[in-house]
Amino acid sequence: MYDSAEETARLEGLSAKLTLEEKVQLLTGRDFWNTWPIEKIGLRRILVSDGPSGVRGEVWDERSPSLNLPSATALSSSWDTKIASRYGAAAAVEARRKGVDAVLGPTINLHRSPLNGRHFEAFSEDPLLTADLAAAYVEGVQANGVGATPKHYIANDYETERFTANTVVSERALRELYLAAFEKAITEAHAWLVMSSYNSVNGTTATENELLETPLNSDWGFDGVVISDWTAVRTVESAKASQDLVMPGPDGPWGAALVAAVKSGEVSEEAIDRKVIRILRLAARVGALEGFEPVQAAPVTVEDGVAFTREAEAAGSVLLANPAGTLPLDRAQLSKVALIGHNGLHARTQGGGSATVLPSKVVSPLEGLRAALPNAEVTYSIGAVVQEGIAELPLDEIVNPGTGERGMLVRFLGDDGTELFREDRRATSLTYFGGAAPIDTAQVAELSVRWTPTVSGEQLLGFASVGHGRIYVDGTLVHEETSKDTGGMDLGASLLAPPSIVAPLQVTAGQTYDVRVEFDMKTRDASMAGVWAITMGLEADNSNPEALIDEAVIAAKDADIAIVVVGTNSRVESEGFDRKDLDLPGRQDDLVRAVLAANPDTIVVVNSGSPVVMPWRDEVKALLLTYFGGQEYGNALADLLFGDAEPGGRLPTTWPKVIGDVPVLDITPKGGIVAYDEGIHIGYRAWLRAGQVPAYEFGHGLGYTTWTLDGLEVSGPVSVATPGTVSVTATNTGERRGKQVVQVYLSRASSAIERPVRWLAGFATVVLDAGESATVSVPLPARAFADWNDGWNYEAGSFDLHVGTSVTATPLETTVEFVSADALV
């Protein structure tokens, strides 16, 4: 692992060959995704890439597609460390295919509030569940020779003012919740990188914070690279902290200013040397440094990534309700199925922001259902518009005027109209992060297609990007306008959820139109050099929402069963901004009620990455939560609906009935401060403390079989030196193979300190055939009993132990003794 004294000495020898200027250069990226190579010591570049639900690679380009894995909330709902490890391994295989040395993931900030716009990208509201899954993910990535980067360190659980806000949080809450979520990824999985966040913590920006040293280095033994979130480092002061690598480059706050600071004695050269050694150690581990064998020369865990995506989605989908046993459906009993909902055709397979990847193929729910029901009629109705903003033109409707092939011609023009750069693209949604395109020097970007629509009528044609543009159809200017940032949006939002400019256009199906968008590059959002995004396409027509619902009702009445897919859109769940509410966008609630009235045999599928309010939830025949399901979403959904796979998920986060019930909700900075006044009481802990009953509690999830748990035994007493074990007998009492998650909680009513009402102490998954029984053992470590007060403290005495299948569905209960070291002598 290149952490021995001998190997460290070798790295120090290489560092000694570098001048101060070369050392400092190495501490800032060469560009958006690469570090600097230094040939004289045999150092090549290190390429990092956004993840964590796939690996995009060096370019954001549909011509270089990536495996689109299910969202982190789907992964965490599996409660399965084996799935998490395989997930990490699959990401690493993708990374190696794309020449990537380190994946910027997993995201393991906690679900403190469901309004967090990036909620879908993180794991859970519970630190133990997060920590165990994160460690397994990291192990999976690094076992295949690629660095993993747990992020965002630390207390970065909101998007509003994320660059500047100050998280004010107690030391106890930091240690027991937010740092605990990261700890095992370092101490057990030995992550090779950690990403520091944008925000401040208790008044000091994360990149300058002592938390980078303690506990990360001094307590946990981290010997890897602390890489900054992009532009998170702002001053030379951060070089005095345990911040190692500034991204992106080549410009940054260190450079010449840091060289001068070292020469003046403001920053010690020893501090610089330590950072250089860590970067060289990372290079050695990933095979970027001559004379050092990589930790893993070739991937050791390789499987069919597409097949795994389908399996992982099923393993993480949660059957929230199935009161009449409607699911799984019997294919033989169905002759006509009505699929309804915008997301039924245009499903969300991933959230917005830097986690976005471009898959080669996405299977929609409509495609999945039709493939699964070859002998039945599957109708489709949109029902209610969910899309906000521009959706790109379908590839099969556009031709590149320059090549005559499917796609779009993109040209960048200079001030005098000369062509500076051109490329042939296979999509009309473009994102540039660096690369060869002259984003900063071009005057105009020109997007051209020959478009042959498949539907007649009025279409809203236009573009989405911050700046001034013109829309031409058949050589005629049809619209010209400047779109502006509406406020409160950072770079991530302006890139991936920009405002739209559209013009109404009457089109005839089968007729071809020459469409061109000219965008004035000097008017773009230039807050980061070399970065720009634009989409040419269509805005959804929502001019007659009642007609859309009426069409869906007619289809539902005429069907054996109705399946409504509801969900969110990129303006609701994305990096760069937080959510305003927990409502489903558009008229989706009205749609579900209307379909239920037309056909009581209605199943609702929820295609969101985060909690939504569902006022009709008790009226549906079945309710299935599928999150953002990855590129095999439609096939996985069909597997679940027809019982080819069981929904194996259990909720990693509490889902409310109404937003007003959520005990910890607000994430909007006040005077630049986000105060974590609730302390250690977040998630289900806060719900239990407030006495509120949610729609679906932490740990909840049904399957397609039935279970009993009995025979509870606890080894003990437990001490710091002697961990315990909880054992139960799980029996599958149903008629088919199934999965159960055994959950162990602790509580202590009489305590010398403030404690949660109860807290997760351990868990284990078990899969059994019908009628089969097995003993399930769950480790009970000493840390499950600990509290933080200038160190880990252990209160001796009796604790109540609760075992079951969700946070309050715990039919097995007993007590366990925790004894102090003195009592053992």
Image (tube, grey):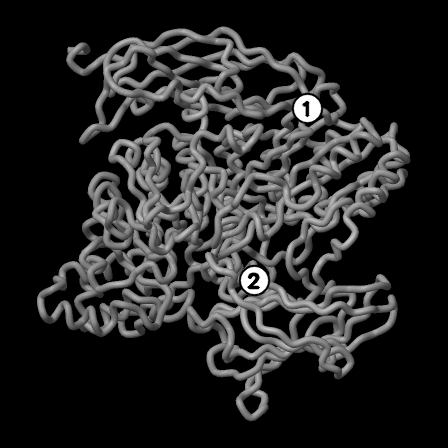
Q: Nearer the viewer, residue 590 or 259?
A: 590
Q: Nearer the viewer, residue 700 or 545?
A: 545
Residue corresponding to mark 1 = 618
**Residue 394 vertical placement versus 407 (above, below):** above
Please report the residue visible at 68 percent of the width from the left and 69 percent of the height from the top.
Answer: 462
Image location (x, y in percent) of residue 8: 21, 54
Residue corresponding to mark 2 = 498
Q: Is residue 143 visible?
A: no
Image location (x, y in percent) of residue 502: 68, 67
> Type of residue at label 2?
Pro
> Type of residue at label 1?
Asp
Residues packed near mark 1 inside 10 Å, few (<14), some (14 to 19) or many (20 plus): few
Q: Is residue 719 left or right of residue 405?
A: left
Q: Nearer the viewer, residue 339 or 459?
A: 459
Image location (x, y in percent) of residue 613: 60, 34
Secondary structure under tag 1 reads helix
Does label 2 or label 1 sit earlier along the sequence? 2
> Badges 2 and 1: C-beta atoms under 8 Å apart?
no
**Residue 448 vertical placement versus 110 (above, below):** below
Distance of mark 2 from mark 1, alpha carbons? 37 Å
Image location (x, y in percent) of residue 283: 33, 60
**Residue 708 vertical placement versus 327 (above, below):** above
Q: Is residue 698 visible?
A: yes
Q: Nearer the viewer, residue 590 or 610?
A: 590
Residue 370 position by quadrant:
top right
Residue 30 position by quadrant:
bottom left
Q: Is residue 814 left or right of residue 558?
A: left
**Residue 454 vertical placement versus 789 (above, below):** below
Residue 44 position by quadrant:
bottom left
Q: Which image quarter holds the C terminus?
A: top left
